[in-house]
Amino acid sequence: MRAAAARYGTAGSLVLTALVAAPAGTASGAPPSPEAHGTAVAAQRAATAGIRWGTCPEAESLPPSVRCGTVAVPLDYAHPDGKRIKLTVSRTKATKKTADKAVPRQGALVFNPGGPGASGTYFPLVGVLPEWKRIAAAYDLVGYAPRGVGRSAPLSCQDPKKFGKAPTQAPTHPDASYKKERIAQAKSYARGCAARNPGLRHYTSLNNARDLEVLRAALGEKKLTFMGASYGTYFGALYATLFPSHVRRMVFDSAVNPDPRQIWYANNLDQSAAFEHRWADFRAWVAKHDKTYHLGGTPDEVLRSYEKVRAELAHKPAGGTVGPGQLQAAFLRAGYYDDYWPRRASALSAYLKGDPKPLVEQAAPEPRAAAEEENGSAVYTAVECNDASWPTDFATWDRDNSRLARVAPFETWDNAWMNLPCAYWQAPRQQPLDVRTSPGTLPPTLILAAERDAATPYEGARELHHRLADSVLVTEEGAGTHGIAGGPNACINKHLDAYLLDGRVPVRRAACAPHKEPKPSTGVRASELPRER
């Protein structure tokens, strides 16, 4: 999951904008909601002010080729004249040329990488990659840090030093004592979020969608061209429902299931089930390359090797900081991206041969990243807890996760603990918006999904396709990478280019063969492997 300003010249245009911004389903002639009116007011102000681009703050770690600015948005859209917060925005201008021809500028392409809690300010850097050069020629590449993230009115729920505590345990079948400990931690975390963040209840997916509308206006774009990945697809879909007449083109990469009944408790259970399948894919790949890794010739044998490492780390953490919790987190990332597979398998193999250094390099917490990671966790928790109702009785969590862990132990309880603060959340909850558009309401939109994606299971892409009329679903069959736009699959990138550059889409659905599996490697230092996301 980072132009010249348009102007609204009359009071009449302000009223018109407010009506356009009203949520779908509002009765004809009914006054706009306070939030819809506030969004229109904020968008008008942003269009007038524009964005003053300059050198990016040092904290963003961006080169001089990327310019940065800020956009002011209301903390509470129902009160647009109240407190405002500033979102950090980054941009590179369209290059207007490719290797073979000049290209006309098509406007700004705004990107969000997901989360909740991830910053997209790095996005303008992708323009130098071969897969993105044609898009970078036609579009200004715009990234931003959503509310709460990074320098955009950041949230924090606890001391980062406590957040990054290591080593930790991570039992797949926790006993009553461990559950009691984690309940206490969840309650403490929820209290910390409320105490440290007076405006906590305003960090929601609906407000992220409204912020996107204000950003569109600040960029001087009459209509929005947007690409969201993972969680970015959810509030992108909210935007499409709230502001359909302001959509130019939208790409939904690795889509969240937007069914209100799924937000967010059920989606997390589905995610845990899907990660078990992806964990099996990884073990099957390692077994296929047993001559390289010597971890076992079957997926079950590979699992036994992993569990042996896990048991040893429970008694003697590697490097003093890598326990079962850190091991699980490192291998969870391999469930997102298969280009991690050689790295993870090499580390596991080396550890069992007596060399823990590769595992420590890959799994040990990075103290310098503690504040950023705590901030991301705080935003994730705030948004998901605020967005919808959650079970408030731990007995429900215990029943559902104990049942699921019998067949999907890899991520189930770790995922539950991450979300458990929502059971004790003190801010008021919202009712999720019913994402749905009618034929002709939106221009064609493009949904990209990998069939075995674990972070956002494929059913979510099908559900979004069903709910957004005139959308097109492109599937990478048999693959499980999370976030596939601009990746190694040329077929996916061909559809992405055709849509963003020419507005062309397949008829309803299309399929791409999977990208090639990673090649096995061993004895490679972490510094020589691709940088982890």
Image: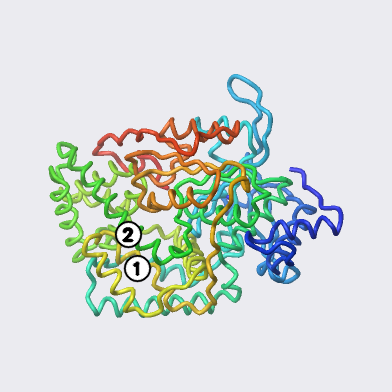
Colour pattern of the rendering: rainbow
The residue wearing badge 1 is 416
Q: Quick one: 324 or 115, which is closer to the camera?
A: 115
- Is 22 left, or right, of 467 in this rendering? right
Relative to 397, say whether 462 is above or below: above
In the image, residue 324 above or below residue 223: below
For badge 2, the amino acid type reads Ser
Number of the label disc, if any, that sits on residue 272: 2
Determine whether label 2 and label 1 are within 8 Å by CB: yes
The three-letter code of the residue at mark 1 reads Ala
Residue lying at 50% horizontally and 30% vertically, measured from the top left: 130
- Residue 227 placed where, x, y %? 55, 45
Outermost right residue: 10
On the image, the x and y values in percent for residue 399 come to 28, 74
Q: Where is residue 371 in the image (x, y as percent from the top left)?
A: 48, 63
Report the residue at 42% width, 53% height from top: 460
